[in-house]
Image (cartoon, rainbow, N blue to C red):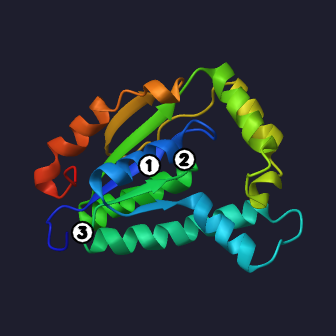
Amino acid sequence: MLGNSTPVVILVNGPPAVGKTHMAVHLEQRYGIPRFSKDEFKEAMFDVLDAPPVGAAHRFGRCAFTHLNIVMEALTRCSIPHIVEAFFYQDLAAEFLHGLVNRFNARIIQIYLYCDRRVLEQRFMARQCAHDRHPCHRMIEDHNHILESIRRDQFTPIHVKCELVCVDTTNLDAISYRSVYDVIETISCHGAPQPK
């Protein structure tokens, strides 16, 4: 992929428990390009530092985003298409992504996932109680804040120059991927991946 004139960044964005990992893994398997997740960085830091004290969850999240941004910038600079999956903080993400667009002429495809509010709340609660959930996610101090944001439907796509595709994930077994494929494959001549 080195040498493509237009770097492509595929963002999988949306509220917690909406199905971002499900979508990102699907796209990784279809296109065979690198996928990075904020949660994976966060979990690795937690493991290396051996269960930090309560109160560190937010700092770990911010640190994970910093590492994620370093990887995104390096790959974008080299025009390597990649997938990034996270629940992005609107202001911080917009500023960073504007920088990628302005400095590297990056082409951003934002896949914004949403679903029925009641389904999302149920998924979030079930995930927080799951025994196989990594411990760093069970120590989230702003659990109630996220839950209230879900109930008030306060999540939106990142405000950045991009190709935006909104996908309903209310039923994870019946997601319509066609609109996502169409956008990714339409700009393939500019460096986006083709199916394997």
Q: Which residue is mark 3?
A: 79
Residue 182 visible in the current orientation: yes
Q: Residue at point 43% right, 42% down?
A: 159
Please tell me in which quadrant of the rendered image residue 148 appears.
top right
Q: Residue at point 28% right, 30% down?
A: 178
Task: Identify the secondary structure beneath mark 3.
Answer: loop
Q: Amino acid at mark 2?
A: Gln
Please say if 35 is above or below 179: below
Q: Which residue is mark 1?
A: 24
Q: Amino acid at mark 3?
A: Ser
- The quadrant in which the N terminus is found is bottom left
The reply to whether dot 2 and dot 1 touch (C-beta < 8 Å) is no
Please tell me in which quadrant of the rendered image residue 80 appears.
bottom left
Please tell me in which quadrant of the rendered image residue 54 appears.
bottom right
Q: Position of residue 114 (x, y in %)?
A: 52, 29
* Gap between marks 2 and 1 measured at Cα: 19 Å
Q: Which of 39/98 is in front?
A: 39
Q: Which of 113/101 is in front?
A: 113
Residue 63 lies left or right of residue 78; in this view the side is right
How many numbered marks, from 0 up? Answer: 3
Instruction: Identify the mark at residue 67; answer none if there is no mark.
Output: none
In front: mark 2 or mark 1? 1
Q: Amino acid at mark 1?
A: Ala
Q: Residue at point 83% right, 71% down?
A: 51
Residue 35 lies left or right of residue 3; in this view the side is right
Callout 3: 10 Å neighbours few (<14), some, many (20+)?
A: many
Instruction: Identify the mark at residue 90; answer none if there is no mark.
Output: 2
Residue 169 visible in the current orientation: no
Pointer 2 or 3: first along the chain: 3
Q: Position of residue 177 (x, y in %)?
A: 34, 32
Task: Identify the secondary structure beneath mark 1.
Answer: helix
